[in-house]
């Protein structure tokens, strides 16, 4: 099984790319780090004092993501996943029955490059897009899907952008990343070829 890591700043097209790959690659499962946000009282209290808390890795159930990834790697029959409802800020546990042999695991989200994974053995993808386009995409998504006002998005976007690139420096210097603009058909076709040709780097 090959693990594909898709990361990028908010609004850069990570979900678009993950959905494309899900359709084009056979026997694929997608894990979104957004689905693993914490919903306990402590994180809700933190959010009152730190407006960018949900752009920090402390806000997600890191251990639970790794458990899910391990269960998929082990080809277990029952896989525990999570869903996070942004408007109500509620996390729900889901159990998926795994009947197929999974060939590709896609891990997608702003925290995908910061998990306890061996990134020498994963296919790492960085979604790149113009900052203004990313802002417009996030504004549309947050207003429609997450019930946020423009003023709140304006306050959070630049902080989110800066935090992402701050924590990207180390991984991008240590591991191989394919850089892609999700609306570029040529680079997408090239990416598909690279995924099928990818050979894991041995430690």
Image (cartoon, grey):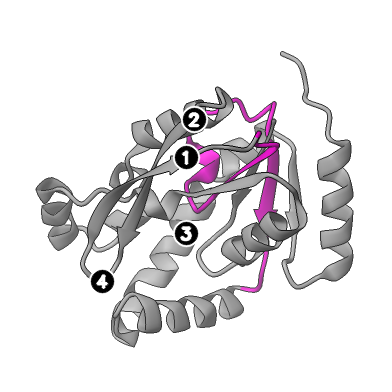
- Secondary structure of residue under mark 4: loop
Q: Which residue is mark 4?
A: 87
185 in relation to 154, above or below: above
Q: Residues within 10 Å of mark 1 (few under 14, many from 20)?
A: few
Q: Which residue is mark 2?
A: 77
184 in relation to 117, above or below: below
Could you tell which of marks 1 and 3 lies nearer the N-terminus? 1
Mark 1 touches mark 2? (CB < 8 Å)? yes
Residue 34 on the magenta segment: no
Alpha carbons under labels 2 and 4: distance apart: 32 Å
Residue shown at the point (67%, 61%) measured from the top left:
17
Most foreground residue, 155 or 44: 44
Could you tell which of marks 4 and 1 lies nearer the N-terminus? 4
Could you tell which of marks 2 and 4 lies nearer the N-terminus? 2
Image-based side of 76 in relation to 12, left or right: left
Residue shown at the point (51%, 53%) measured from the top left:
109
- Secondary structure of residue under mark 2: loop
Image-based side of 40 in relation to 134, left or right: left
Q: Which residue is mark 3?
A: 162
Q: Which residue is mark 1?
A: 97
Q: Residues within 10 Å of mark 4 (few under 14, many from 20)?
A: few
């Amino acid at each position: 099984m090959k693990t594909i890591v898709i990361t990028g700043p908010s609004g850069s097209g990570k979900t678009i790319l993950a959905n494309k790959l899900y359709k084009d690659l056979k026997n694929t499962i997608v894990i979104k780090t957004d689905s693993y946000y914490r919903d306990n009282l402590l994180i809700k209290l933190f959010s009152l004092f730190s407006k960018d808390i949900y752009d920090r890795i402390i806000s997600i159930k890191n251990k639970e993501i790794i458990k899910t990834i391990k269960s998929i790697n082990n080809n277990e029959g029952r896989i525990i996943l999570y869903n996070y409802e942004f408007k109500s800020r509620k996390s729900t546990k889901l159990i998926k029955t795994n009947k197929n042999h999974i060939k590709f695991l896609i891990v997608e989200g702003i925290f995908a490059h910061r998990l306890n994974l061996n990134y020498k053995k994963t296919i790492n993808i960085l979604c790149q897009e113009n900052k203004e386009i990313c802002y417009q995409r996030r504004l549309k998504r947050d207003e429609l899907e997450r019930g946020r006002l423009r003023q709140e998005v304006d306050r959070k976007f630049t902080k989110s952008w800066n935090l992402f690139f701050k924590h990207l420096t180390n991984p991008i210097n240590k591991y191989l990343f394919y850089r892609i603009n999700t609306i570029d058909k040529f680079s997408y076709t090239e990416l598909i070829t690279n995924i099928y040709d990818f050979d894991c780097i041995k430690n």
